[in-house]
Image: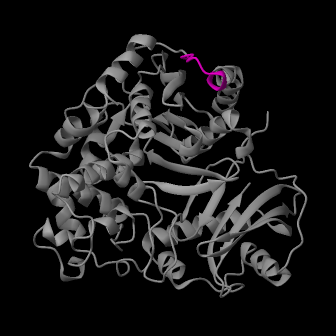
Amino acid sequence: MQRPFSLLIRLGLSALSISLLPWAIQPSLAQANLELFGPEASSTEIPTSNTVLAFQQKDESVDAFIEEMIRENQIPGLSVAVIYDEKLIKTKGYGLLDREREIKVRPSSIFPIASVSKPLTATAVMLLVESGQLDLDAPISTYLSDLPETWQTITLRQMLAHTAGLSEKVYMQRPSRLTTSVSFLAEAIQEPLDFQPDEAWMYSNTGYNLAATIVETVSGQSFGAFMQARIFEPLGMTHTDVLRASYVSSNLAIGYEPTARNQKLEAIDVNYAALHRVMPMFQGAGSITSNALDMANWAIALQKGQLLTPESQAQMQQFNTLSSGRVTDYGLGWFLKTVNGHDMIFHGGNLWGYASSIVRFPEDSLSVIVLMNKDGALADSIAQQIARQYLPDLVEDKEAAAIPDLDPALTEQILAFVNGDDQAIATTPERLIALQTLRGQSMLNRFRQYTRAHTIESLSLLERADHPNGIRQRYRAQTAAGDIHSITVVVTDEGLLSSIGILS
């Protein structure tokens, strides 16, 4: 079995982060799922389709891969759902929900889904757009009062697209003050913008929390009540909720994270007092809890085009354009990517002791959901590697033959940059702006920590393709230690670096 690459470090317009990746409904339907599997079942539905029957035979290889990942990465427990052609074809729990009590994970086990909440929050906004209560391109001052002058022109679209320039300092420097949505807004408006709206892209929890506040203001309901009435209940997501201080469930997975001292896994606050205390700061950004069965109902609704109109879904799944004219690889609540010719729409999430991922290949009618009780970005890797079991051509071949390099000077610039020379290649203004933000600096430091530990000796060009921002080139990179990595860059027609990704 080919194992997934262990690390993707990406610095660009829309993903300045380190994440683990492989090579880079109606209520009646929900009820049918629960009747088929049972609340604690682990099974595979076998619809009458030759393709789906073939997919069913992938079970053993998927199970073997997940068990290997659990062993190698100290994952306590994990829950998976695979959806193909609008049907749930696999759902299963692996490992333990609670190590101390030796309770097993099942498809019904509940996990915080962290930032996978964001596409659900964006869906809530789009529902209000469809009803005429919100306008994506209206200033948020239309819906929120007493905003700073610099915030007056920010739009809902920009907040959902992560191009509003809202600072993350309230999250990264003083989270203890964020005990209610009111206190969150009071703290957030104290910070100047990191950049002018649409000037750059930087991932922003702040924007999604404000979006939830706008949903509350316009609907007259709490965010949780709105989500229940308009999304969770219509889709039969009966075990999905917005985490509240009063939330209690014996089926909620215990979260685990490695200690700083010896990397041994330890349970986070098992009373969830810490989680409850900070949920207001993540309300629209990451406060939802769910299970694999409910998430599958959501994925099926997305495949069927339910809940939102086709026009709304299309808006959520298209690139956003910056004031420079260059595009980001984020829509409204979704990351957007192409893998070997397959369009991929996805989002991952991390919260203390938990990680989650939903990966969708709409043209292939395939979706994969992974929920786990260990933090880190490994959920993305597992979800995409599971997808590869069903769509083998998603894998990028590291052993592919090199193609003629039409711009060896650019290749030398990329090699020098990866090996630590920040001046080797000029960068786009928007990327430079993003790197100067608090979050950008944090991600850049982690990028450099990784590249310092992996000196690249040579680059061989494997792929060259047009990109909306210029040219995309993928290289095979060999390290001094003999390891093979994959490096993908996007360079503008002017020779400016727009994004770079390293897969090991």
Q: Is residue 47 magenta?
A: yes
Left or right: where 362 falls relative to 4: left
Q: Is residue 410 magenta?
A: no
Asked where in the image residue 366 lies, by quadrant, the reply is top right
* Residue ID at (45%, 16%): 101
- The quarter of the image holding the C terminus is bottom right
* Residue ID at (31%, 40%): 307
- The quarter of the image holding the N terminus is top right
Left or right: where 235 falls relative to 104: left
| Residue 2 x %, y % | 79, 38
| Residue 178 x %, y % | 23, 56
Magenta stretch bounds: 44-52
Left or right: where 208 falls relative to 51: left
Left or right: where 337 falls relative to 356: right
Decide: is 275 above or below 247: below
Decide: is 359 above or below 140: above
Residue 467 visible at all? yes
Asked where in the image residue 470 lies, by quadrant, the reply is bottom right
* Residue ID at (10%, 73%): 146
| Residue 444 x %, y % | 57, 70
* Residue ID at (33%, 71%): 166
Asked where in the image residue 76 lies, by quadrant, the reply is top right
